[in-house]
Amino acid sequence: MTQRTHEDAPQDAAGRPVARWLPGAVLGAVLGVLRALPWAVVTLCIVLAVLAPALAPFNPVASANAPLLPLWSEGHPMGTDSLGRDQLSRLLYGLRPMIFVSLGAVGLALLVGGAYGVVSGVQGGRIDWALMRAVDVFMSFPIILAAILVLAALGPSMLNLTIAVALSQFPIFARLARALAAGEAARDYVLAARAVGYAPLRIMVAEVLPNIVRPLMVQATSVVALAALTAAALSYLGLGVRPPAPDLGFMVREGQELIFLAPEQALLPGLLIAVFALAVSFCGDQLADERTRPGGLT
Amino acid sequence: MSAPLLSVQDLGVRYPVRAGLRRAEITALAPTTLELHRGETLAIVGESGSGKTTLGRAMLRLVEPSQGHILFDGTDLCALRPRALRRLRPRLQMVFQDPYGSLNPRQSIGTILGSVLGHVGVPRAERPARARALMADVGLDADALSRRPAAFSGGQRQRIAIARALAAGPELIVADEPISALDVSVQAQVVNLLQDLKRARGLTLAFISHDLGMVAAIADRIAVMYFGQVVELGTAAQVTHAPAHPYTRMLLASQPVPDVARARATIRAAAAAPLADLPSQIAPPAGCPFRSRCPRALGRCATDPPTLGITPQGALAACHNPEPAQGDTTE
Amino acid sequence: MTQDTRLTAPTGAHALSTPTGARTFNPPTGAISRRRFGQMLALSGLAAAFPWRIEAQEGVRTMVFALPELAGNFEPHTWVGFGDTVHAMDCIGRGLTHMDFDNPLPQPAIAESWDISDDGLTYDFTIRAGLTFHDGTPIDAAAVKRSFDRMKDEDDPTRPDLSFALDNLGGSNVLGFDVVDDMTFRINLAQPDAAILGRLSRPDMILISPAALDEFGREVGPNLASCGPYRIASVTPNERLVLEAFDGFYKGTPEVGRLVLQVIPEPVAQMTSLASGDLNITNLIPHSNIDRLEAMDAIRIEQSAAFISAMLAMNVSAGVLGDIRVRRAINLGIDREAIVREVFFGKAEVPGYINPAAEQGFDPDHLRHSVYDPDAARALLEEAGAVGAELNLISENSGFWPRLGQVVERSLNGIGLQVTTDYLDGGTFNARLFDREAHELAFLQRSAFFPDPDGRWSPLFMTGTAGADSITAQSDLPEQAQLDEMIAAANAESDPEARGQMFVEINTFMADEMMPIAAVVNTFLPVSVSTDLEGVNANALGTYRTFLEGARFTG
């Protein structure tokens, strides 16, 4: 599975200029496939993560065989790790924290940051000023450090990792939502709504929000990759799920020490992180392109 | 005369701005006092930037005034808490200049009207019928209710905006340049629609426009604004036939009038005046703000700011050297 | 660092590597031919790629040792951790005694002999005649006293803030220091303490030149002049420390004329440097890569004794751990063979109890305290009614600890406990470790800065220490009083053989009667050496000490 995604994903960006002189129909088909590919990869990753309990041949936290069996060993196509656990099972289960955390964190950040930004943008004035200065202060804090503080305070767990990553994404959404909402709030339909006497909350939710939800969603898609990488980085630092539960970021760290002895120990989880992040990022780019592309064009 | 429906007293709006490193204030609306009587049409006229839109919005407390009071039917809007103000708001409605921006693009017309009707307490069951009736009132088909604003032309949207204002059951409508964004061919239709609705429903109308000639036809009284101030206030006849303030005269002259020679003379006179820079809103000049463009400026105009006073014509004007009554200044 | 300018050759060579175009067209003098200049340029280019390689081009054979970091301050009396300074101090300095990690007993160093009074309270050291410090100042009893007074005298103007040295020597048990005669220096103690001879070999007990103290005062750290085998030639913080052989060293001038301690923090970079010959010695490469490295021709892995111990501290004040049967069950439930195999890739050994096999105090009988017997463990848990008990283990989240934590957790869950492990950063880990309310099970690491059997006892397991009071809370146990007495008695025994035997009994007593600690594994830092080098003290390097004076090139 990793092999297929590995060879396909990077071709998307390069594909277009190279293919320019190809006949139109071929070009269209190739582009269509290339465009569908990242979506397929992301879907596949999510399906694999969700179905990990059904697909994994072994318990990912129990020793299944001798340690450090190489790739393509009998019964262990991805070998075993230094504690003799089946690497394929660990890779499948290891997808879960990254995917759940990145999607969950982006969802949470979208919700909280979006609400925060809409309040700031619609209310304006001093409230806007205070809320945005708070975001500035937040942004001046290094993301990883802030996340480490959160995890140190709450203790490492998947939920807390989600909160920490969401916190790192929060300013992005707060600022975007604020800018979009402020733009909408200056439009006459919001003034008309105020003139009718609607309450601020109703104006935010019923009038402004529906008009900024699409760009926010596009933004959300484009930062899932960032969230996945942040989650992997925090796991790599030992702030993710509690070992022995498998987690790609931590598997890279465990494998790094063995880079000469058994390079696949670090490379396989690293590759999986890269493929997922790349595919999600291509998906986000496609959505963003569609948003900026003028109507009739493909 | 009965008590006015709306009375603004010393209503002023200033915005803080940053000019370089300094903090400064822009006076968008100098302290203004005027009244709207039940059933009348007051036109507020001025160039863009004259503060007429600010006055229109401040009257309804849609922008926050920096000073003054707004008495609506005896209630001071500026003293109301947000919740009480929102309860009162349906009685004061607004129609905006840009029909493309004043309707929420994500909502169908039915939703827009329905939620206003719901807000003023119309039971859910009655809302569709009321919405259809409103559409009929503004001359649109009821099947428009299911569509979104993007499906309509500018004139149609302005009718929808009027319907939305009516849906709230207002006593006062502030129409902020409701026709300036429309094709000439539909401008008259919208103006007539407003006039008809006003008459039929006994509304009070504040009609904001830059077109003195047009409002002369529909307004009972006219307030002329310049640089954030009301410089002349009188009946439509007084203001358009015997303007007391040189600025009003200039506005009249800039209208496309048949008397070409007279217009030319006025414009020439204005052009011959020492044309200083337009006054800065951040550092307003001392004295009368119009004096740099005024053909009748006196020495004291540079020092003493004029205030509204009774003119020989019986209107109010803020001028140290108003046009003489019945006078014909153009030789 | 002002003193760095003394040896400017490498710096000058570096300057050429910068692209100064003007020089190419206008050689400053005719003395440098274009061809020679080209050679220099190529050389300096090489130096830019491998900044430490240029050192090897200057006639004197140079030995390169890898440092993880280099702050550049070698003040011995404020040194608290491993880091860079321990290596530097070991190469630059030497104290009254020396422990070479081959012989379990302290040997003479700057002191050529010593007399201990019958009551064990007075130690008279005879200073070796004719020695000087690196700066030429003669070493006599007064000079030695100057270094020790600096530890104890709070008013000494050269004493650095936060000096820990006296605590490491014996704390308040050290009453004072005397000059008996020109070449006799005396230490007075309140209670007998036979471990003091070993402690005098610690890196922070090195002697400092009085002239350097006079000149630099509290700033002597970057300008350290002592009497070790090498002296400072130049210091470039975060890059390298260049040392040259000291011809006045008491064991004779080291054979290798120049020693460079080069900052190479990444194990991968160390491995490639070893393979290319740019690095001669390192003890920083993880255990997992040793077999791979050993297969390479240019590299030899030295056999080191396992002085570094990982232990499992059991907080006897926490719940079921108050029951000695549960503690014994945990001790029996740790699969140490699996730990040696899976966590250390075979580069470790199953321990006896507290003292490792290479120290006094070890007895083969102690191996029974580290037997893996899951059936007996389960039986003990059942007897104690603690089957299924939930326990929390805290571990650091760096190095081999996470892997060790997973194997220990796995084997303890195998005997019927429910262990969860928190992997914590160093700060959080220590905060919880030193708070008896904040942990149940905790890992503890102990390495040997000097292989005296008491090194792991009186600092860790006597009443009043953080170890006994907070980490294991064993001070609460009734047997602790007897343990305190046994340790005190052993340290009052000046006969090394008898003392060693007493520590054997101390190990047995604590294991059998108290069991607040389960010994988990003994390991060492793998010492990788280029094959043309011999005489490297691998036992010392295996436990963070750096004695390189015996090294020589064979090629």
Image: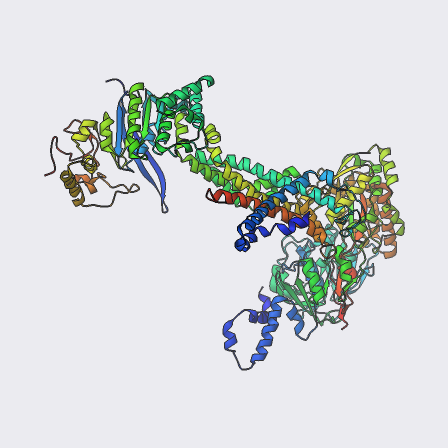
Q: Image quadrant of residue C524?
A: bottom right
Q: Quadrant of the N terminus of chain C?
A: bottom right
Q: Please name the residue shown 72% across and 44% down the image.
A: A90
Image position, residue C263 (x, y; %): 65, 61
Q: Image quadrant of residue C124?
A: bottom right
Q: Can residue B168 be seen by looking at this rendering?
A: no
How many marks the image carries: the answer is 0
Q: Can residue C330 be seen by looking at this rendering?
A: yes
| B140, A82: nearer the viewer | B140
Instruction: Answer with left or right where residue A5 lies relative to residue B16.
Output: right
| C82, A269: nearer the viewer | A269
Image position, residue B25 (x, y; %): 33, 39
Residue reaching furthest left? B331
| C331, C458: nearer the viewer | C331
Q: Is residue C333 above or below residue C221?
A: above
Q: Please name the residue shown 47% across and 38% down the image.
A: A178
Q: Image quadrant of residue C254?
A: bottom right
| B58, C313: nearer the viewer | B58
Image position, residue C280 (x, y; %): 72, 66
Instruction: Answer with left or right where residue A186 lies relative to residue B30.
Output: right
Instruction: Answer with left or right where residue C163 lies relative to residue C28.
Output: right
Residue reaching furthest right? C365
Image position, residue C191 (x, y; %): 79, 51
Q: Is residue C394 above or below residue C28?
A: above
Q: Please name the residue shown 71% across and 37% down the image.
A: C437
Q: Is residue B128 above or below residue A69?
A: above
Q: Is residue B242 above or below residue A164?
A: above
How is the structure coloured here? rainbow
Q: Quadrant of the C terminus of chain C?
A: bottom right
